[in-house]
Each structure stands twice: as structure tokens, then as C-alpha cells.
Image (tube, rainbow, N blue to C red):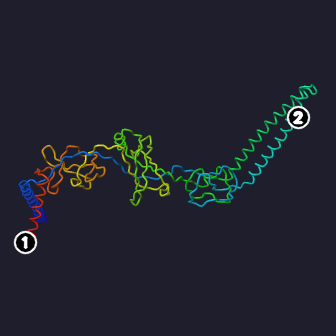
Amino acid sequence: MKKTIIIILSLIIGAILFRYGITVYNNIKSGKALKNRPAPQVVVDTVQERSIIRTYEAPARVVSKYRVDVLARISGYLTKSYFKEGDYVKAGQTLFQIEPTEFSNAAKMAKANVANLKAQLAYAEKQLARAEELVKKDYIAKSQYDQMLSQRDSLRAQVASAEASYNDSQRIMGYTMVKSPVDGRVGIINVTVGNYVTPSSGALTTINSMNPIYVTFPLDSSDYAILANSDGDANSNRKVELYLSNGEKYKFDGVQDFQDNKVDQSTGTITMRATFENPNNALIQGEFLTAKLYANKPSNVPVVPLVAVQENQAGKYVYKLDENDLPQLTYIKTKGQNGDTWIVEDGVKKGDRIVTNGLQKLTPGRPVTIISQEEMKKLEAEEKAAEQNVDKDKK
């Protein structure tokens, strides 16, 4: 039994060693073939800089300039509603009525009190005028005149107090008509007609202003620093475009006229805000869109041709030649396109040499033969002609 096991193990080890030997032989053979293979021909260009207006895209959210909760300022029963949910209303437009009888009666009583006191004051002033003539002739005592003068002055004060009370009752009476403080769109009615409301009942409804309207979006703090340095002023206003969820551009351009005064520690971004015209109420509070922010001044940035850039799971990359003219795979960070080039944020700089043609044939770290674009076109034409001849021969 043991002898059988030893024989089987020997056969397995022998098979493994045989397979390893074949693999080593093939690798040596492939290495020699690769070494003897002529260096691939490639076209090399130098990374250039281009003066462009930087742009930054970010997810954006529509925010009303004013969001107002409509509250009851007095207590009473809601008797009427003058709008429908979702209506567009104007500032000063009546939205609700709170039962006015109690407050109307209070105003009438205050008005009557004013009239009564004014009548008493008029009588007192006439009496005082007569007393003034009589005291001059010593027909009445000076103390009697002083008493009438004091009474007149007291009535004047009472009239002023009554008028203030009447004006206050009129003010409170006005609160029975609950009006919109701003132009905007009315939301859901939270308290319906027939309910008793107080100042602590909460919002009867909410109004969001619609025109103009705000759009907020985050900007990476590093991008903000680049933008501020490019424009020379961190607080300058900038153009903003808006793209709807279907990819269509919003017809009005906005102005970025505010940025927050701090960096969000959790995201590393600064909140920016732009103001847009919204005459047709196309933008709605809370809507998510895409904002595109434009710098005010152009800046020089490195660019690489689109044809020179390839991409894998790790990102975009180019083949950059090192000091020995050997191509090295170099990942780059791009910031959008400009014509037939990629704008490069990181990875290569002006003056770096990159491969722009012949990418399919090269191997990173292996020598290449640098030729001109014209020579590459001629070579490609010859290869195409050769392929066509082979196809003819097959036919």
C-alpha cells in the first residue's frame, strides 16, 4: 500500500516539474522573441498649455429666496379660505379669514369711547375759555380755574389714550384677514376652515417665493482656491448655467453672488449660491439639477489630445516618456474637455512628452522608435494596403 502511494506521489511531482520546465522554456523563448522584436514606432507630442475659462460642474438644488410660514396672529375660528393649494399669490393678497365679529365689536366700542371723550373735551375747553375771562375779572377764584384747566388736560390725555386703543383695535381687526407677506406659490393647507386657530397653532400654510429663485451647489475647497486665484477676487460674481434633469439647458443664465464663509468639514466643500430669473415658475423649490460655474478670467492649463488618453478601471492615463525615452503609464486627473483636448488637473505638466499615436503597439518600460506624424500616416497606409492585398489573395 505504502509503495503504491509513493509511486503516485512521484508521478504527481514529476508532472508538476515537467509542467514547470515547459513554462520556464516558453517564457525564455517569449522573452527572446520580445527582445528581438523591433521597437514599435510611435508619435510623440509635447504637452502644451491653453488659455481657457475654467468651468466646474456640481449637483445643485433649487431653494426659494423666501420661505414664509403663514401664521394666525389672533385667536378665532377660520371662516373662509380664498385660494387653492398650489396657487400663485401676490404679496398682500388675502388667504384666510378669521371670524371678525368679536374684533369688529371691540373696534366699534373703542371708536365710541373716542367720540365720547372728544365730546367731553370739547365741553371742557369751552368751560375753560369762559373761566379764563371770569378769573381775569375776579368773578371766580384762581383755584377753580386751575381745576378746570387740569380737567381739560386730563381729558386730552384720555382722548389720546382712547385713540391709541382704537388704532390698536383696528390693527387687530386687520389680522382677521390673513394675507400673504410675499409673492409666491402656496403649499398644502395645514388647517382647514372651521378649525379654531391661535398664534401657537403653527403654520396655516407655507409660501415659497418663485421669482427670482436661488440655486445652491457645493464646490470643492481646492477648486474654490483655484477659482479665487484665477479671478483674483474670491467674492466676484460669476456666470452659472443650469441643466435640467433631462439634460436640457435652462434658458436663463444665473449669477453666483454668494458663497458660504466656511468649509463643510464632512465633505470638504464650500456652498455656493446663484440667483436665477424664474418668470414662468419653471424651477421649483427642492428640485435637483446640475449647475455649471464659469470663472471670470481665463487661465493657462495643460491640455493633452483626446487620442492620447486611454482609460481603465483605475482612471484615465497616458504614456509619458521618461529621461531614457521609455514610455511609462501615467494616470492623469482631467477637468472636462476643450475642443479636441482634455484639460489636465494633475499627472502631467507643460513640456512633458507623451505618446499620441501607436499606443496599441507599445509596452510600458520598453524602448520605442519615435517617428513623425507624417511617417506614421505613411506607415499606416502601407499596412492597410498590405492587408487589402492579403484579402485579395484569399479570395
Q: Position of residue 159 (x, y in %)?
A: 79, 39
Residue holding disc 1 = 393
Q: Quadrant of residue 85?
A: bottom right
Find numbered disc 2 in the image and state the secondary structure of the residue it sits on.
helix
Q: In the image shown, does 186 or 267 lie closer to the viewer?
A: 186
Residue holding disc 2 = 127
For this view, does 64 lie left or right of residue 29? right
Q: Position of residue 209 (x, y in %)?
A: 53, 52
Above or below, comparing residue 306 to residue 123 in the picture: below
Find numbered disc 1 in the image and state the secondary structure of the residue it sits on.
helix
Q: Residue at x 13, y 57 (%)?
A: 377
Q: Residue at x 42, y 49 (%)?
A: 217
Q: Which mark is residue 294?
A: none
For this view, does 350 lie left or right of residue 136? left
Above or below, comparing residue 95 to residue 147 in the picture: below
Above or below, comparing residue 7 to residue 307 in the picture: below
Measure the C-alpha gap from mark 1 to mark 2.
136 Å
Q: Quadrant of residue 297?
A: top left
Q: Are marks 1 and 2 in contact (CB under 8 Å)?
A: no
Q: Position of residue 2 (x, y in %)?
A: 13, 63
- Quarter of the image where the N terminus is located: bottom left
- Give the residue furthest to the bottom: 395
